[in-house]
Amino acid sequence: MKKLKLSQSFILGIIMVAVFLLMWVLNPRQFLTFGNFQSMAFQLPELGLLSMAMMITMLTGGINLSIIATANMTGIVTAMILTSTIDPAAPPSGAFALVILAIAAGLATALLIGLINGVLIAGLNVSPILATLGMMTLINGLTIVITKGYVISGLPNAVRFIGNGTIAGVPFCTIIFALCALALAVVLNRTPLGFNIYMLGSNPTASYFSGVNNRAVLYKTYLLSSLYAGFAALIMISRFNSAKAGYGESYLLVTVLASVLGGTSASGGFGRVAGVVMALVILQIVSSGFNLLRVSSFMTIAIWGMIIIVVMVVNFISTTMQERRTA
Amino acid sequence: MKKWFKHHETYVLLVIILFSMIITLVNPNFFTLENLFDLLKSYSFIGIFAVGVTFVLISGGIDISFTAVATVAEYVMAVMIIKYGGNILIAFLVAAGVGILLGLINATLIHFFKIPTIITTIATLNIFYGILTVISGGKWIYALPDWFRSFADIRVFTLRNANGIAYGLSIITLIWIIAIVVAWAILRFTKLGRGIYAMGGSMTAAKRVGFNIFKLQMFVYSFMGLMAGLAGLVQALLVQTVAPNSIVGKELDVLAAVVLGGASLAGGTGTLFGTILGVTLIAIMSNGLTLMRVSSFWYNVFIGLVIILSVSFSAYQRRARTKRAIIIEGE
């Protein structure tokens, strides 16, 4: 078992180095520059936090299709409070308390959505894909009703700093992302909740009969997932300097790909934060490298699809060969 | 009577009747043949997709890539008939061929490398759609041949309303009806159909009783591909322009319609009748809200609520049936 996990990160490591070298060779002058690395660091956190929101639910054998809708709802609530109370031209220090309040309200909205997902999935035993598909449609609808399809723009400087500011050259959003990734890794690997999430994902019946409160674990999983979607929302509205219904909808299926590429099993029980972070770095290198080469962004998504297929095929072949050897 | 209330379809049908009555009370234009034929025509596109998705769900899998398959089939078909001419039969064969081919690619990855169906098809969605957009440059196609345009206007039979305007059952709806009948016959009367149900119920059991899983998988995903190709053709007939970005993004809407009809994602269950009801419910709600002059902003809110209520209700029923209030299954 240990060997299998090792080979998964090993494969990811090889791919990471390979795409890095490839992009470097293809474009030696532009790729290996501080500017390029900084822009990659700016772009990664958004998809990164959303992928983690997806990954948490996949660990339990579920899925959360409502993460993008949740993120947009959070962003809209936060942006509406901010734009209605703060003048964007005002100095950043004056309205600090209001910014915190707006963010807290946004995250509370995200948690409320997570709670409803929890009620449906843990309480009523609805299959996660159906429950979150319904919630996705409902929340998307509500964001359109609230905004009437308009863009909410003009956020105060303090909020714009979240997505665009740097500390000693490192983008602030990358720091947030790193902290969130670390926190998730700690929760998953060092707490009883994390242990129970993996247990529930690999065998719900066994986890139930070993005294785990499956229902509580599922509630917490979907609350956590929503919270991470909420964090992603803050970076999203800050980078766009606006909030709107329907931002980032194409990210939804990509987050599933990133999670699976990072070694998360679609049937639950397996997957590590480090793997997902590596997968995100691979996707980001491909995307930025191609962008510098002026290759169409559609080619990038096609390549992303091919990478995941290749990884899955290699995984399959290596597992069957291992099984044959032990047999 | 009591037996009927065990079926999910009965409840969906009751909801449809209830909605129809409410809408008709507000706006009598709803319950006219003209509106009905219009609805049947415009929802043929989603409806044909839904037939294919039903097969995949019954077989225990899931397909996300069908919108990309339809886009590729539609585009290739349009380029071919503009470049080489031809007739509607050739257009159909090209679209169907491309669809089946791409479906077989999905089936190959799923069967031989045991990649979960949802992962395979999300990946191939991106691959098919990405490559098509790169090759086509994202260009829209407007100059479809005249015979293609006139075929779309054919009516199986024609009626006239009070103002003398002609309406009737469109040939496009007929394509949908034929697809349903063929699919129903396969599921109901052939060994293939029984095999699809068996495989969805339990892959191992199906293998043990002697079903050829390889053939079944190939059939299910190429049938989905065929339906996607057909839906691509129908979309081109309906709007008479081919845009690479007009279909992709609708995959979850179609899935929602099929699921409303009672197909389970666990596989082994689901009926075409349920799927038709699911598509009907979505169609009636969207059309009804427009006819009742409700702002289209509210559309998704209602659809979302109906999906949530429907899946919660069927989960509640399932639980009441088993009389066990413990969660021991993730599904």
Image: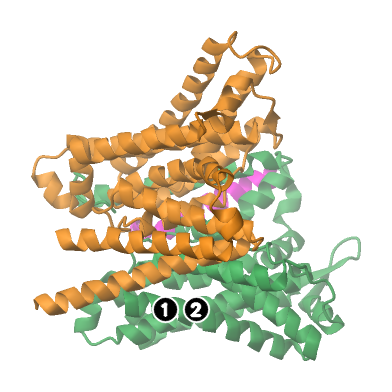
Chain colours: A orange, B green
Under mark 1, the amino acid is Ala
Q: Determine the residue positioned at 91% across, 61% down.
A: B163
The quadrant of the picture occupied by the C terminus of chain B is: bottom left
Rendered image quadrant of residue A292: bottom right
Rendered image quadrant of residue B279: bottom right
Residue extent of the magenta highlight: B1-25
- The residue identified by callout 1 is B107
The quadrant of the picture occupied by the N terminus of chain B is: bottom left
Q: Residues within 10 Å of mark 2 (few under 14, many from 20)?
A: many
Name the foreground residue: A17 vs A125. A17
Q: Dot 2 falls on which chain?
A: B
Position of residue A290 relative to residue B290, above or below, is below
Name the foreground residue: A115 vs A120. A115
Looking at the image, can residue B215 be seen?
yes
Rendering coords of residue B21 (x, y %): 62, 48
User: For residue B10: magenta?
Assistant: yes
Query: Is label 1 on the same chain as label 2?
Result: yes
